[in-house]
Image: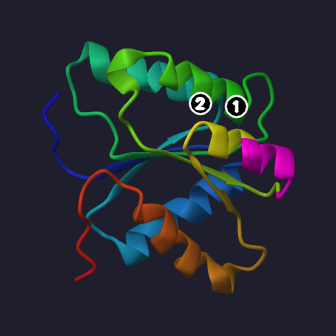
Amino acid sequence: MIEEATTILYIDDDPDDLMIFGESIRNLYPGISVLKAQSGEEGINFLNLLEQQNRPFPSLIVLDMNMPKMDGRQTMLKIRSKESWEDIPIVIFTTSSNIVDVEFCKSYGIECITKPMSYSNLNHTIKQLVSYCNRQISTD
């Protein structure tokens, strides 16, 4: 796949989290596009569609841990099971600070970042998340 503009795929079942994340990225990094999926299944379908259309994969997948049906663990394992997707960086972005979740992420070499409890801490957390993109991001 040819890499083009920097794109983040954010998979989260909470529409408010999807909206706030997208707005924060737009404000901090206007050149980054955010693709949103409200379930693990929708995120997987989106990756399949990109592959079928021979379009670039996201520079980063931000994934909520606690979702109905296919949770973050299952979604991550499904993504990692496909050879063409295995190099896409994934960061778990969750309200959980459960040590089991953190250890699960570590065992797969994936960063687990806790969602901030206040909007004032969100910009710092967004910058941290963006640092995991597989492309260099300009902050200018």
* Residue 101 painted magenta: yes
* Residue 134 located left or right of residue 64: left
Residue that appears at 83% across and 58% down: 97
Segment tinted magenta in the rendering? 97-103
Q: Looking at the rendered structure, which numbered label has been put on residue 73? A: 1
Residue 127 lies, with reference to residue 88, above or below; the image says below
Residue that appears at 69% across and 35% down: 72
Residue 13 showing in the rendered view: no
Q: Position of residue 131 (x, y in %)?
A: 40, 65
Q: Position of residue 70 (x, y in %)?
A: 72, 23
Q: Looking at the rendered structure, which numbered label has been put on residue 76? A: 2
Residue that appears at 23% across and 18% down: 53
Q: Quadrant of the N terminus?
A: top left
Residue found farthest to the front: 107
Q: Position of residue 132 (x, y in %)?
A: 42, 57
5 or 23: nearer the viewer? 5
Residue 138 lies, with reference to residue 132, above or below; the image says below
What type is the residue that disc 1 sits on? Arg
Q: Secondary structure at mark 2?
A: helix
Q: Position of residue 73 (x, y in %)?
A: 70, 31
